[in-house]
Amino acid sequence: MWGLRIFLYVVFSINFCFSQKEPVGQNLILFLVDGNFKYFLLNLIKILFTGLGANLFNNTDSRMKFGAKTLIENGVEADYLIPVFPTQSYPNWFSLATGLYVENHNFTADFMFDPNNTLFFERDLGADDLNEKWWRANPAPFWYSVGKAGIDVHCYWFATCHMPYVDLVVQVPLIRRHSFKNDEEHDLYSYIPNIMKYIQKYQVYRKQLVLLRYDGLGKALRTHGEDSEQTVQELSNFDQQVRKIQEEMETWDLLRSTNLIVLSDHGLIKSEEQNQYYIEECIADSTKIKQIANSLAFALIWPEEEEEDTIFFELKFCDQWANLASVDYEGETKEVEPSVGVYRQHEIPERFHWRNSRFIAPIVLIAQPGYQLLTRQIPSTSVSEKFGREWKMLDGWDNENPDLQGIFMARGPAFKSGYKGGPLEIVDIYQLVLNMLGVDPCHPNNGSWERVSEFLSDELEERSYQPQNFGIRNSKPITLLLVVIEILIVCNFSFYFLPTDLF
């Protein structure tokens, strides 16, 4: 009898001691909105909303922003979040994950053509989209560095999170893997309580990184437009999720140990039929064009051999857009920017950090925001053509346009309270995540620590670890190879599977 009592006493004592243990560090929840958002670590919850532009968010009825208002009052908000060019999903997701401009991470666009292998990438909807040539030799995403540091990583419809990288795989259940092929609605709301329960239970052993992405708002904007009932409902759903996460964090006593980041990758702009241009109308003989890719906000054009000069000249002086290059004001002619810019690859503006990416064509058309480029007979990426004709709102234009900029807000022990700061860039988030989790990066990055540091609490701002800034001005294939070599040298190389999620 006494033996049983002693045994029960020991078991109770052990359980009591473990229940009193402090978290090993801060956790991070990152919430990405297809339409805008993001989260950070003691534990870190990161939420990404796709398609939510800063202007759309700022103009939303305040009664539909209770959750966001609570977050901002207790945390920080950036003026806006600047995406990379092109303002499409995959280029920005890779910049978010790696801290690199597009010409440095080399995932060039949502729609790409590989002329050497005659392969097409079409935003998860093409037959060749899983070919290793698109995914091989890419720089390490931050969840690779985090996982190798022994931190638990959990992904909810966060793009490419489930893909193996070198010697690590984040095991994500099939139901929670991202693909644009899967058009089902994701019930993120129902997962939130179990996410918080898991963080509270395991944070005494390991830091936790949770990556969430919500695409309902982006779908509503693209399919129905910004003034539709569906978009109004999705804006409300977004805010309810932000509110629910904070309420559950409070219920599970996580506000002192867990950081929440909410962000969006980029905004969207209305698509109107009168602003559509057909490339055939500029070309005397369209058979001189071999292939076009991504015919929407910009177009990548591969002419037949020895026809580049002819095609470039015809496009440069096409009446569809060249005659808009000047406007007569009461007898005075003033030059204005044409509605479509025509460039050879080396002429693409440096500020885009895009000209040296993989699969950039010899000729590139870049339309002004709101204008579209389409084809009728010239071979093109069929999925982008379909979207251009069907969707009410599109992306891909100049990343300096206010309607295409995203949002960033956060709260938690790593952040100041009630603070509004200047703009951030999406490439800044990589070093922020790693610094909050106390993890060294596998490669330098293009982000600015100066932009990030103003949002952090004094404790985080004064940390000895300072991420390096990095800029490859003229990326070549050898530069990407050097990045990959550095990853293999810096990171411990032992094949590692992160455990399957329990929630």
Image (spheres, rainbow, N blue to C red):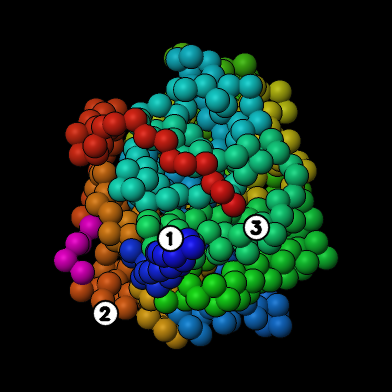
Disc sitting over residue 191 in the figure: 3
Label 1 is placed on what type of residue?
Answer: Gly
Name the residue at the left extreme.
464
Rounded to the nearest angstrom, the CA distance separating label 3 from label 1 is 43 Å
Does dot 3 land on a helix, a strand or a loop?
A: helix
Tally of numbered discs: 3
Q: Is residue 190 left or right of residue 457?
A: right
Does dot 2 land on a helix, a strand or a loop?
A: helix
Please tell me whether residue 46 is drawn above or below residue 387 in the rendered image: below
Disc sitting over residue 3 in the figure: 1
Label 3 is placed on what type of residue?
Answer: Tyr
Main SS class of the magenta portion in the image: loop
Please say whether residue 180 is one of the residues in the magenta stretch. Answer: no
Q: Is residue 93 left or right of residue 388?
A: left
Rounded to the nearest angstrom, the CA distance separating label 3 from label 2 is 33 Å
Mark 1 or 2: the one toward you:
1
Q: Is residue 355 left or right of residue 176?
A: left
- Say which residue appears at 26% left-offset and 29% top-offset: 481
Disc sitting over residue 257 in the figure: none
Please tell me whether residue 257 is drawn above or below residue 488 in the rendered image: below
Upstream in the sequence, badge 3 or badge 2? 3
Does dot 1 land on a helix, a strand or a loop?
A: helix
Q: Position of residue 488 (x, y in %)?
A: 24, 32
Q: Can residue 67 be seen by looking at this rendering?
A: yes
Crowd rating for badge 2 (residues with CA inside 10 Å; few <14, some 14–19, many 20+): few
- Say which residue appears at 73% left-offset and 70% top-offset: 236
Give the magenta-colored segment's residue range: 463-467
Crowd rating for badge 1 (residues with CA inside 10 Å; few <14, some 14–19, many 20+): few
The residue pinned by badge 2 equals: 458
- Say which residue appears at 27% left-offset and 49% top-offset: 441
